[in-house]
Amino acid sequence: MLRLDQIHPLISGNKWFKLRGYLELATSLRKSTIVTFGGAYSNHLHAVAAACKLLGVRCAGVVRGERPSMLSPTLVDAAAMGMDLFFVSRKDYTEKKLPEMLLQQHPEHLLIPEGGYGPEGIAGAATMLAGVNLPMYSHIITACGTGTTLAGLVLGTTEKQRVTGISVLRNHLSLSDEVDRLLPDRRRGCFEIINGYHQGGYARHTPDLLRFMNEWYRDTGIATDFVYTGKMMFAVSDLAAHSFFAPGSHVLLIHTGGLQGNRSLPNGSLIFQ
Ligand SMILES: *Cc1c(COP(=O)(O)O)cnc(C)c1O
């Protein structure tokens, strides 16, 4: 398992890698503020706030939904790290409309698409495998949301590796096309996406999933998050039980981080919370 959850106490996992290209772009374009989008428990918002604090860059986050009377722990962290929060209606959020106030306060900004999807995101994600002895592995597996991380892995590997994404979304069947769109011709289609392990949909969970995550923690000491890595491990364990991996396979699992998001679960749901 590639433990990207352990690279830094605050900027966890794949989000850092997806961000690096955008942060370099902001510097070269002399943009004074990074602006991006996310929900109340977004790993992406959390990582952007942490990275900008470390680098001394201003940042603003557009958050889906009205401002709640009590901010989520994720948003409390983001605000404490200096992120300016702007709450917008679900409709404006879907349309990716930036609030007037934000435009006035941060006219010179660089916009990072939700989840870091885009060419800068994938180029950064491809560097996740630096330091991995790639020829050792027959399979590489990651959870996927936007598919940017998966696309980066496809860029960073060769035809010797089977690259698999476990989708955490329900009925998002255009995901393969969206991943292909990020890839150069020669690497299109060099991956597979497995649907059916979403456990009810994005950020949904089932008692089976939480039970699995607790058992897996007990067996390995590795904590997972219920939105992404828990579903990936659940899928890998189920696939292994159904002979998905031929004998002699060497499987590299990507721990993409995201543990901060477990704070949205009721206390006591996880033994490692
Ligand atoms: C965002 C995220 C992913 C999904 O990454 P995509 O590049 O959007 O597919 C996977 N795991 C964790 C922990 C994440 O926060």
Image (cartoon, rainbow, N blue to C red):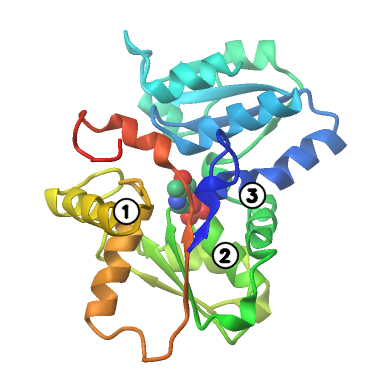
Q: Residue at x 43, y 58 (%)?
A: 144
The three-letter code of the residue at mark 3 reads: Phe
The three-letter code of the residue at mark 2 reads: Ala
Disc 2 residue lies near ligand 1 with CB under 8 A: yes
What is the x, y in percent for residue 224? Answer: 36, 49
Question: Badge 3, how many Cα within 10 Å: few under 14, some, many 20+?
Answer: many
Q: Is residue 43 above or below residue 152?
A: above
The three-letter code of the residue at mark 1 reads: Gly
Between tags 1 and 2, which lies in front? 1
Report the Cα–Cα distance between label 2 and label 3: 13 Å
In the displayed structure image, the side of residue 208 where residue 190 appears, left or right: right
Report the Cα–Cα distance between label 1 and label 2: 20 Å
Q: Which residue in the protein does label 1 denote? A: 230
Between tags 2 and 3, which lies in front? 3
Quadrant of the rendering where the C terminus is positioned: top left
For the question of whether residue 49 can be seen, the reply is yes
Disc 1 residue lies near ligand 1 with CB under 8 A: no
> Who is closer to the viewer here, 122 or 267?
267
What is the x, y in percent for residue 5? Answer: 50, 47
| Mark 2 or mark 3, earlier in chain | 3
Between tags 1 and 3, which lies in front? 1
Question: Badge 2, how many Cα within 10 Å: few under 14, some, many 20+?
Answer: many
Q: Residue at x 68, y 72 (%)?
A: 184
Pick out the residue farthest to the left: 207
Q: Which residue in the protein does label 3 denote? A: 17
Q: Which residue in the protein does label 2 denote? A: 151
Q: Which mark is residue 32?
A: none
> Who is closer to the viewer here, 206 or 9?
9
